[in-house]
Amino acid sequence: MSLAGSALEAALQAVGRGLDAAGDHRLLYCKGAGRLVALDEARARDLPIGGGVLCGVPPDVEVEAYRGNPERSRPPPPGAAPDEPFVCSFDKMAEHFNRKASLLETVPLGSFNSLFSFTGSWKNDAAATKALAVDGYSVPLYRVKITSDELVLQESVKRAIPYIWDPPALARSVALSRITAHTLLLL
């Protein structure tokens, strides 16, 4: 049975593509039509996995069944019993999400906005929000990752990046805006 159209195939297609840190992080919102890094697509293989076949897996991409416990997506409440709900301000919850992503910024990530259905200005959302709470479990099924230690940018990406730091030139760069106007994150 082919895994075409599955979430696992979507994850494979998203590997090496860009994400906008200010946007939604679901696979549907990956930037561009192709990968930002070069992978050996010519030697792609069909990988039997989970009762099906995942087609077109490059040799420098690893797909493995996740062998861990469900992950609790609830920050530990400071000084409270472990089963008490974690309720906090907009700013504290945004800090929690940013810390999980190893970011020191105060502007909420797109995943935060998506989870809580925020769509406006983050300052307006913060002013209109009294408190937020999050508690749940995620059960990862598979891990899809690039195994190569040396990533090489695609030539089109190299050409799109200006050689000098000139903010007005960056703002005018149509080629760069096709990749993303915000921070690039590689999956």
Image (cartoon, rainbow, N blue to C red):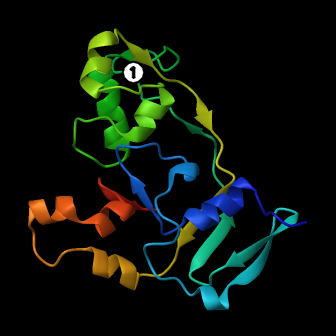
- Counting other residues with Cα less than 10 Å from the Cα at mark 1, is it few (<14), some (14-19), or many (20 or more)? some
Location of residue 186 in the rendering, given as x and y in whole percent from the top left corner? 41, 64
Residue at the extreme right: 1
Number of labels in the image equals 1
Image quadrant holding the N terminus, namely bottom right
Identify the residue at horizontal 65%, vertical 69% (top origin).
63
Name which residue type carries label 1.
Pro
- On the image, the x and y values in percent for residue 88 come to 35, 16
Does any portion of residue 151 appear in the rendered image? no
Q: Quick one: which residue is furthest to the top in this view?
A: 130
* Residue at the image position 24 percent from the left and 23 percent from the top: 123
The vertical placement of 24 against 169, above or below, is: above
Residue 62 visible in the displayed image: yes
Residue named by callout 1: 77
- In this picture, is 36 found above or below 9? below
Between residue 38 and residue 83, name the one nearer to us: 38
The picture quadrant where one finds residue 105 is top left
Rendered position, 44 above or below 111: below
Q: Nearer the viewer, residue 58 or 160?
A: 160
Residue 10 at x, y = what percent? 65, 59
Residue under the point 61% across and 73% down: 62
Pick the residue in front: 133 or 153. Answer: 153
The part of the image, by quadrant, that contains residue 95 is top left
Query: Residue 27: x percent and y percent?
Result: 56, 52
Above or below, 16 against 118 in this view is: below
Horizontal relation, residue 65 to residue 25: left or right: right
Considering the numbered disc 1 on the image, is that residue within a helix, a strand or a loop?
Answer: loop
Residue for point 37% across, 59% down: 185
